[in-house]
Image (cartoon, rainbow, N blue to C red):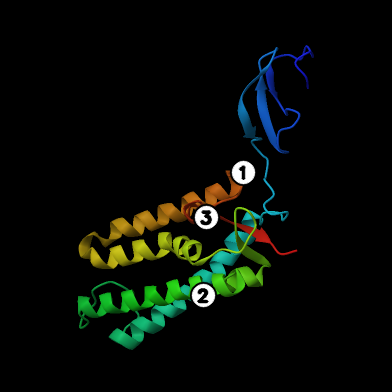
Amino acid sequence: MSESQTQPAGWYHAQGDPPGTQRYWDGTQWQGEAEPLPDAVEPIGGLNLAEPVNRIGARVIDGIVWIVLLLVVAYLVTGTSGIGLRADGVSYTAHLIATVIGTALVVAYEVLMVLARQATLGKVALGLKVARQDGSAPGRNEALLRVVPFALPQLLAALAGGLGWLFVVVSLLIGIGSVVLLFIDPRRQALWDKLARTVVVGLP
């Protein structure tokens, strides 16, 4: 559209703007910056972004891996299957040690898999991979930042004792908010994607 056209005021795609964007036309000229279309999904690095259902499925698989790691460590350290909670006959310190070790293993699993394969076991199973926003492979910093929203609330819940439930709630809110973002965010970025500036794409 050119300025000579008598198009009514409204939101349109402006010539020269990236695909999947719109800009406001006031009837005589363009106003503001190009904005993503409400339902647009931006391609990253020439690859399509992963479907939300596939991402949720991959996270469920990884969640099972995390639970197994945490339960095995808890049993080896405390002789029970409790994680980060006081239990009869088991000291809080023992549970804290088990939580720290278990969380460290979860972090190591996430970081090493992303660095080695650009994908955790869940993502490998569903044909997904993690990438920077330009489509390149993530580095150590991105891999670490992606796991912070999972690991930090777990550790804080163990350290907080009786107030640990607050951090459990925080963890649940992070998960629920991220699921919502997968369906409404133009780049389908969960909260940990935004923190690390990464995306999840489908394998070619």
Residue that appears at 27% across and 72% down: 85
Q: CA distance from mark 1 to mark 3?
A: 13 Å
Q: Depth check: give the residue in front, 145 or 88.
A: 145
- Describe the element under mark 3 as helix, strand or loop: helix
Residue matched to label 2: 112
Position of residue 195 relative to residue 22, above or below, is below
Residue 35 image-quadrant placement: top right
Q: Is residue 62 left or right of residue 145?
A: right
Q: Position of residue 17 (x, y in %)?
A: 71, 33
Q: Position of residue 201 (x, y in %)?
A: 66, 59
Rendered image quadrant of residue 125: bottom right
**At 61% across and 48% down in the image, what residue appears?**
187
- All told, the count of numbered labels is 3
Quadrant housing residue 117: bottom right
Q: Position of residue 64 (x, y in %)?
A: 51, 73
Q: Which mark is residue 32?
A: none
At 68% across and 30% down in the image, what residue appears? 22
Q: Is residue 82 visible?
A: no
| Alpha-carbon span between mark 2 and mark 3 | 17 Å
Q: Indicate which disc, 1 or 3, sits on the residue closer to the N terminus.
A: 1
In percent of width and height, residue 185 lies at 58, 44
- At numbered mark 2, what does the secondary structure look like: helix, strand or loop? helix
Q: Look at label 1 and name its amino acid.
A: Pro
Left-right relation of 62 to 167:
right
Q: In this figure, which residue is indicated by the disc labeled 1?
A: 186
Which residue occupies 34% across, 78% down? Answer: 101
- Residue 131 is at least partly visible in this image: yes
Query: Mark 3 highlights which residue?
Result: 193
Q: Report the amino acid beneath label 3.
A: Asp
